[in-house]
């Protein structure tokens, strides 16, 4: 936001009177500091803002002030303003979250507020935050944000809301908890004593107590009415007769007094008031531009209005910017409409013309958002459209997506059809707002409008924008849209498990497995769509349209990466980074650098990938943006391969926390699956199982079926560890998991089948030049060949694998294959094959073996059970939680099981232990050495 305009929104209005007119209310506000929220709620003209500003001047606490208007109905803009206001009392509050708010994938509001609340908790002083004119906010997300803020408000912070309408907060709950102080109409009415102070001391009148009482009665203590009456009385010799001449409701009094006040002003002042009433904020040069009058100073007129108490409020200490009192401004605009409709000699002046003049002034002074608002109010479509398009970065990408969308929605279809650029703009704004429904229809409407148009630079650029929009839609389908048809998929899943051995794990798998084909064909089509449309966009977009060209190039890299063309992906990402460095924002730079790290990692260039991911974290700054979760996850995978399990887990946990801040996404599933792998490496099978169960529950609940294959691959390892080969085989076959199927075959002793599966998969990954998958296949092939009795061939292949792996420093890829790999490496070392590298690997094997010998954790090594029917591993898990004192409900949450399932396990445990109660079960288990 432009600094001068921002300053007017954060300016605390100074006390308007030298005397404290309402000490009773000042005391109420002071008493209210014990609560979380003070709500000052009343209709216009009751002196709400004036009262709070006078209180702040004497209360002794530092305060932040934010004046709101209709343009602030955007959660990112609102929070940016809120944190900027707080910085007026504590410089560094929220400093790290501003970039996150501008991210295309911003974190959840709760996570952003949590960061700022933690910073406020560190402030040593008590502070006050005032939100003025909160009634203009009509976005539920902002109400929810402030509700969250109130629920977690630090004790040193107090919130004041000034509004005409009650906000949609849980006021009843706050009231019951004594966390709410309320000042309403009945409290804000001036009594006779306060009215006397205002009329005689502030306004300089000498009214009798009877006249004051009459005015207080006529206006019902309404300060706006009292002030209008006082201004009118100043021009009457007989105050008593004037006071007796009006009565009635607020509206009647207001109309009467408004006419009186205007008639008392000179003609040029009346014109000034009426014509400038269209402005939300006023300064001298702007008013002069509205009036087309350079003969008199607009700034001097504003100062005169302030001296005359004509409902004008300063917005900065320099008295450069002002605004009319809201009620006074509304009345002036009504009078302006009436005057222009009745006048036949207005010399072409209309409200639209005044708005157009305002728009021109704002544009000439670099205030594009304000210029757009007045152009839209003037119904000047060409000007508004040009301002939205901007000179490089469209307005809806600069924090004005809500007003732009509202304007576009208000336009008739015929207007949009006549200007295809508006349809393109509409689609782009919907993408930015995260509202994909209807985007394709708007792009088609734009294409229809371009039929027969001259193929000039502007038309070509629009064609490029349409293509870019379609590429973005296709990418959204792949990365963010759940697949439907879950019930049918689950039915097919249950059928695949018919006839398999029924145990706890198999039962958990029913509802987890889903046919891979449900999404692969759709995703492949979307990948090709991204490539075709991105290339089309780059062909037609204007060379100077760097923001969209950069985004299209990045999407091209994403598509090439998804298709497996890693060389093309590297080139596209490198190009996107190069172009994005010319732009002010680093969002595309982050995304492209993450993509580049992914591809380098896929090419087994782990050291370069590590540097690239760390570069992402440097670019993102602190606190990290949620999009950097992918960099942390990449660093976790690399740390894992380098056998730094602690670092791997730390990065994975950071990645998980960041991914969970992204709304409506499944990205954190990959983080959880990776954490399960770390548990595997540490032989924590129960911990891994719990993580995978949680991930499976999430994807089933939210229909993210395409995430199940990666969960299934990890589940295969779990099932093989437990010896449930049938269920492991079903998973591998259902998802065509070649590596998993080979492991199942090896577990069955069918080395020929394993080698055949691996050979087929090897051909596929070599055709795609997937170096990471090629190395994985080679390592598992060496084990399969060794078990198949082809030791020489195994050693030869192992030597080739080691040569590739050493360049990236791979360790876990070999260690995770277990004792057979250790034997094979020892054999290779005896043949003089890469002795130094093999020596490092064998040292890790030795350390792992020592840990296993030293470890006495009963979860990893269940004791021999002297029972006729031993407890299953899941029953042992439940028994351990019972011993810890967990309730059935808590066990459900811990293990992600249904209540009926937990109760069933309890019955089995009691039956096998021959007990009736929980305490007996725990005692019996301890006797048997099960706990």
Image (cartoon, helix red, strand yellow):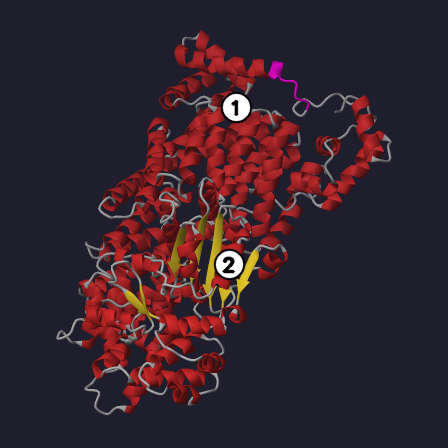
The x, y position of residue 267, in whole percent, is 22, 84
Among the two numbered marks 1 and 2 on one chain, the one whose residue lies closer to the N terminus: 2
Which label is found at residue 213? none
Q: Nearer the viewer, residue 203 or 16?
A: 203
- Which region of the structure is painted magenta? 852-858
The quarter of the displayed image where residue 360 is located: bottom left
The x, y position of residue 61, in whole percent, is 43, 50
| 258 up-or-down from 860: above or below | below
| 619 up-or-down from 307: above or below | above
Residue sitting at 48 percent across and 86 percent down?
248
Q: Residue at label 2?
A: 27
The quarter of the displayed image where residue 19 is located: bottom left
**CA neighbours of label 1 inside 10 A, class few (<14), some (14 to 19), many (20+):** few
Label 1: element kind: loop
Q: Nearer the viewer, residue 269 or 352?
A: 269
The x, y position of residue 739, in whole percent, is 51, 32
The x, y position of residue 609, in whole percent, is 35, 31
- Asked whether residue 904 is in view, the answer is yes
- Asked whether residue 729 is in view, the answer is no
């Amino acid at each position: 936001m432009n600094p001068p305009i921002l300053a007017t929104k954060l300016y605390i209005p100074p006390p308007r009177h030298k005397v404290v007119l309402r000490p009773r209310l000042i005391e109420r506000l002071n008493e209210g500091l014990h609560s979380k929220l003070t709500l000052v709620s009343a209709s216009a003209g009751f002196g709400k803002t004036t009262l709070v500003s006078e209180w702040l001047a004497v209360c002794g606490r530092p305060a932040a002030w934010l004046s709101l208007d209709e343009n602030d109905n955007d959660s990112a803009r609102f929070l940016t303003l809120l944190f900027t206001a707080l910085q007026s009392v504590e410089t560094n509050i929220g400093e790290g979250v501003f970039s996150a708010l501008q991210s295309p994938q911003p974190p959840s509001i709760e996570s952003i507020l949590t960061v700022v609340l933690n910073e406020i908790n560190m402030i040593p002083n008590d502070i006050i935050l005032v939100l003025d004119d909160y009634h203009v906010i009509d976005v539920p997300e902002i109400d929810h944000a402030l509700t969250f803020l109130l629920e977690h408000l630090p004790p040193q912070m107090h919130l004041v809301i000034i509004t005409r309408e009650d906000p949609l907060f849980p006021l009843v709950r706050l009231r019951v908890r004594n966390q709410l102080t309320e000042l309403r109409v009945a409290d804000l009415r001036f009594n006779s004593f306060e009215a006397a102070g205002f009329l005689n001391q502030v306004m300089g009148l000498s009214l009798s107590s009877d006249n004051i009482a009459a005015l207080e009665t006529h206006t019902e203590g309404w300060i706006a009415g009292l002030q209008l009456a006082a201004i009118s009385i100043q021009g009457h010799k007989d105050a008593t007769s004037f006071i007796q001449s009006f009565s009635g409701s607020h509206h009647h009094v207001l109309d009467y007094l408004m006419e009186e006040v205007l008639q008392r002003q000179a003609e040029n002042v009346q014109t000034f008031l009426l014509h400038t009433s269209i402005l939300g904020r006023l300064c001298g040069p702007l008013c002069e531009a509205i009036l087309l009058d350079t003969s008199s100073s607009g700034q001097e007129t504003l100062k005169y209005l302030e001296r005359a108490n004509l409902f004008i409020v300063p917005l900065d200490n320099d008295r450069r910017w002002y605004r009319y009192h809201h009620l006074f401004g509304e009345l002036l605009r009504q009078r302006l409409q009436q005057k222009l409709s009745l006048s036949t000699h207005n010399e072409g002046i209309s409200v639209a013309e005044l708005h157009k003049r305002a728009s021109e002034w704002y544009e000439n002074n670099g205030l594009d958002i304000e210029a757009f608002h007045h152009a839209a109010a003037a119904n000047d479509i060409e000007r508004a459209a040009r301002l939205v398009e901007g000179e490089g970065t469209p307005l809806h990408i600069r924090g004005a997506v809500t007003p732009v969308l509202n304007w576009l929605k208000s336009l008739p279809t015929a207007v949009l059809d006549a200007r295809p650029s508006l349809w393109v703009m509409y689609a782009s704004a919907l993408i930015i707002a995260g509202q994909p429904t209807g985007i394709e229809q708007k792009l088609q409407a734009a294409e229809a409008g371009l039929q027969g148009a001259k193929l000039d630079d502007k038309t070509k650029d629009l064609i490029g924008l349409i293509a870019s929009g379609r590429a973005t839609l296709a990418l959204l389908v792949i990365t963010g849209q759940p697949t439907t048809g879950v019930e049918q998929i689950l039915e097919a899943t249950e059928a695949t498990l018919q006839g398999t051995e029924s145990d706890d794990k198999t039962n958990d798998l029913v509802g987890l497995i889903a046919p891979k084909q449900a999404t692969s064909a759709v995703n492949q089509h979307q990948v090709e769509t991204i490539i075709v449309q991105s290339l089309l966009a780059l062909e037609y977009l204007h060379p100077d349209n760097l923001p969209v060209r950069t985004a299209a190039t990045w999407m091209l890299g994403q598509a090439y990466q998804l298709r497996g063309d890693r060389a093309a992906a590297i080139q596209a990402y490198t190009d996107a980074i190069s172009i994005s460095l010319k732009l002010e924002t680093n969002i595309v730079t982050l995304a492209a650098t993450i993509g580049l790290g992914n591809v380098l990692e896929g090419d087994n260039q782990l050291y370069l990938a590590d540097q690239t991911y760390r570069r992402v974290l440097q670019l993102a700054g602190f606190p990290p943006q949620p999009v950097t979760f992918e960099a942390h996850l990449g660093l976790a995978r690399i740390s894992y391969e380098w056998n730094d399990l602690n670092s791997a887990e730390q990065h994975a946990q950071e990645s998980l926390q960041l991914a969970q801040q992204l709304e409506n996404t499944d990205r954190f599933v990959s983080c959880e699956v990776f954490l399960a792998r770390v548990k595997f490496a540490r032989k924590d099978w129960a911990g891994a199982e719990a993580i995978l169960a949680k991930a499976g529950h999430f994807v089933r609940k939210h229909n993210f079926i395409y995430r199940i294959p990666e969960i299934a691959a990890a589940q295969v390892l779990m099932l093989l560890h437990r010896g449930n080969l049938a269920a492991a085989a079903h998973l591998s076959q259902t998802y065509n998991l070649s590596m998993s199927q080979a492991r199942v075959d090896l577990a069955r002793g069918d080395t020929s089948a394993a080698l055949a599966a691996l050979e087929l998969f090897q051909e596929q990954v070599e055709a795609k030049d997937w170096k990471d998958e090629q190395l994985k296949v080679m390592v598992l092939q060496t084990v399969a060949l060794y078990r198949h009795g082809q030791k020489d061939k195994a050693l030869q292949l192992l030597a080739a694998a080691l040569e590739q792996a050493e360049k990236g420093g791979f360790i876990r890829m070999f260690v995770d294959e277990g004792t057979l790999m250790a034997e094979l490496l020892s054999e290779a070392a005896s043949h003089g094959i890469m002795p130094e590298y093999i020596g490092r690997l064998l040292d890790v094997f030795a350390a792992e073996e020592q840990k296993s010998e030293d470890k006495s954790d009963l979860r990893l090594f269940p004791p021999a059970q002297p029972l006729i029917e031993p407890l299953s591993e899941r029953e042992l898990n439940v028994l351990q939680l019972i011993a810890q004192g967990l309730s059935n409900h808590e066990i459900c949450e811990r293990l992600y099981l249904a209540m009926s399932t937990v109760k069933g396990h309890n019955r089995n445990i009691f039956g096998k232990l021959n007990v009736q109660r929980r305490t007996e079960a725990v005692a019996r288990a301890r006797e048997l050495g099960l706990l």
